[in-house]
């Protein structure tokens, strides 16, 4: 039993030793083998590899993929006309030489990202200081990104290369700082209100003009209609007078009687009317007395 336990313990020790000597490099990583704190070997190809057991050799991994770095600094940058703007940007970069990267930057990708962010921010500050807001927004936007990329590459590939490559630099947003933005919004709002008030005033003037023209046309139409109506009415009255004259000329006694009836109708047209006269001595009621007195007017 003691011999079996000894064999089992020895087998476990051997397995532990083998596991510490074997390591796998992923296709997305570099494998860096250290020997007493010094870089012994950099493995770039994926697969199973061997090394000495710790503490003689250790292995670390560095990402070899294309990395993104987003600039989220809200500190305003002054343009050529001294306008504070905020630049949002991103950088795509990768580690190309793990040995140089570890010696000049460090083992952690975050450390390299922080240092690269400082370099990119400084390059953007220099390029933005040379240009106006209009140039940043339109004509020289691509030129700014190319100049920043060239400055960053010159920095990371200089006397002490970082072992990285900057693939692309892009500007995602150029905006005024918050204080300036509020001022611009207020100025835009005031301008829109001014235009709206001007349009309302113009519309009100046009509406008054249209209304006055419509009233004038209405008065003209009513006047013309009244003129035509009076003309027709005059012609009708003339024809009626001619007819009456012709009819009354044929029978003067009937004409006198008819006119008396019209006078009675005009005088006694309401039930509440009260007329106190002498029927026997009044010429007004002569037509009611009949006889010879009703045959015609007195002479």
Image (spheres, rainbow, N blue to C red):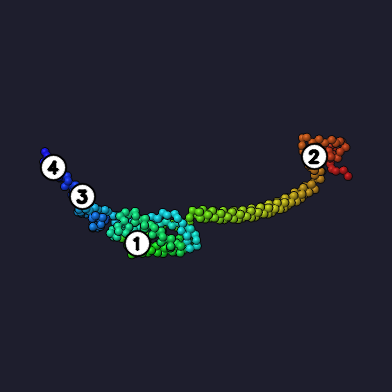
SS for tag 4? helix
Residues packed near mark 2 inside 10 Å, few (<14), some (14 to 19) or many (20 plus): few
Label located before the other in sequence (3 or 1): 3
Neighbourhood count class around disc 3 (C-alpha, 10 Å): few under 14, some 14–19, many 20 upward:
some
Q: Which residue is mark 4?
A: 6
> Residue shown at 45%/64% (left/top)?
130
Residue under circle 3? 20
Marks 2 & 3, CB-CB < 8 Å contact: no
Instruction: Classify 10 Å Cα crowding around label 1: few (below 14), some (14-19), many (20 and above).
Output: some
Contact (Cβ within 8 Å) of mark 2 with mark 4: no
Identify which residue is drawn at 28% across, 58% down: 98
Quarter that holds the N terminus: top left
Disc 3 to disc 1, how far (Cα)? 36 Å
Q: Earlier in the sequence, mark 2 or mark 3?
A: 3
Q: Nearer the viewer, mark 2 or mark 4?
A: 4
Disc 4 from disc 1: Cα separation: 57 Å
Determine the residue positioned at 27% across, 53% down.
Answer: 61
Side of 195 relative to 158 (left or right): right
As helix, strand or loop, the secondary structure at mark 1 comes to helix
- Depth check, mark 4 against mark 1: the one in front is 4
Q: CA distance from mark 2 to mark 3?
A: 138 Å
Residue 134, x across and y down, in percent: 48, 62
Which residue is denoted by mark 2 in the rendering? 267
- The picture quadrant where one finds residue 280 is top right
N-terminal label among 3 and 4: 4
Q: Position of residue 195 (x, y in %)?
A: 57, 56
């Amino acid at each position: 039993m003691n011999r079996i336990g000894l064999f089992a313990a020895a087998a476990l020790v051997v397995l532990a030793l083998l596991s510490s000597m074997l390591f796998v490099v992923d296709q997305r990583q570099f494998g860096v083998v250290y020997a007493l704190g010094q870089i012994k070997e950099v493995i770039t190809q994926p697969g199973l590899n061997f090394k000495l057991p710790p503490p003689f050799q250790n292995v670390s991994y560095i990402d070899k993929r294309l990395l993104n770095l987003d600039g989220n600094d809200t500190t305003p940058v002054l343009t050529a006309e001294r306008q504070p703007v905020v630049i949002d940007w991103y950088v795509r970069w990768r580690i190309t030489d793990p040995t140089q990267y570890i010696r000049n930057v460090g083992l952690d990708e975050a450390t390299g990202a922080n240092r690269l962010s400082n370099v990119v921010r400084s390059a953007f500050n220099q390029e933005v200081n040379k240009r106006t807001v209009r140039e940043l927004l339109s004509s020289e936007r691509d030129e700014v990104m190319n100049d920043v990329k060239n400055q960053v590459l010159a920095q990371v590939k200089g006397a002490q290369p970082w072992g990285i490559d900057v693939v692309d630099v892009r500007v995602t947003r150029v905006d005024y700082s918050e204080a300036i933005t509020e001022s611009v919004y207020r100025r835009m709002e005031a301008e829109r209100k001014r235009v709206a008030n001007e349009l309302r005033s113009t519309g009100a003037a046009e509406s008054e003009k249209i209304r006055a023209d419509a009233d004038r046309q209405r008065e003209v139409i009513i006047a013309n209609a009244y003129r035509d109506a009076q003309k027709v009415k005059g012609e009708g009255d003339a024809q009626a007078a001619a007819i009456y004259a012709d009819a009354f000329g044929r029978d003067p006694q009937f004409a006198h009687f008819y006119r008396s009836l019209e006078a009675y109708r005009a005088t006694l047209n309401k039930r509440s009317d009260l007329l106190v006269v002498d029927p026997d001595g009044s010429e007004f009621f002569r037509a009611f007395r009949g006889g010879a007195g009703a045959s015609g007017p007195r002479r």
